[in-house]
Image (spheres, rainbow, N blue to C red):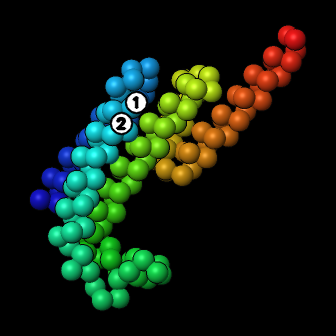
Amino acid sequence: MNEQMFSVTGGLAMVGWLALVLLPRVEFVVRVLTRLLIPSLIAVVYLYLMASNLGQAPAEGGFNSLEGVKALFTVDELLLAGWIHYLAFDLFVGSWEVEDAQRHSVPHLLLVPCLFATFMAGPAGLLIYLILRTIVGLVRGRAQEATA
């Protein structure tokens, strides 16, 4: 069952990421599919795993130390829940990046590597996108000053 949940949630996330890369101007893709629908479906699986397995967490498990988190992840279902947490949140952030890039006129081809980085390494990808957005804004500002 865990392998099925892993595969299904990973497949859903992959559909979302591919949609963001290939269909970034389709409002349904950005605002509904990748920001609401897919993360919500993944969240249902997350909630199921957390609710049905928290009682199985080792006594030393918890979120107040690295050792506590490591103990929680000795339970396969809680480890899977942790992975699913990343899938949902990273996709949500990716959808925000797409919409924000459009709002700030960041070319989509420049955004794609940021989306890949967000998919692979969440916070690092977000940071790379924020740096890109800043650079694009500075370049556009200088270009506007030069033509004024």
Decide which of 51, 84 is in the foreground and name it: 51
**Which quadrant would residue 60 be assigned to in this image?**
bottom left
On residue 79, which mark appears?
Answer: none
* Residue at the image position 43 percent from the left and 47 percent from the top: 90
Q: Do we see residue 107 in this rendering?
A: yes
**Image quarter in which the N terminus is found:** bottom left
* Residue at the image position 21 percent from the left and 64 percent from the top: 49
Task: Kindly identify which residue carries mark 2.
Answer: 34
Q: Position of residue 86 (x, y in %)?
A: 39, 54
Decide which of 130, 8 is in the foreground and name it: 130
Cβ atoms under marks 1 and 2 closer than 8 Å: yes
On residue 30, which mark appears?
Answer: 1
Mark 1 Cα shell of 10 Å, populated few (<14), some (14-19), many (≥20): many
Q: Position of residue 113 (x, y in %)?
A: 53, 34
* Residue at the image position 75 percent from the left and 22 percent from the top: 140
**Which quadrant would residue 79 be assigned to in this image?**
bottom left
Q: What secondary structure is found at the residue carrying circle 2?
A: helix
Residue farthest along the top direction in this orientation: 147
Residue kind at label 1, given as amino acid type: Val
Q: Is residue 138 above or below residue 65?
A: above
Q: Is residue 140 above or below residue 124?
A: above
Residue kind at label 2, given as amino acid type: Thr
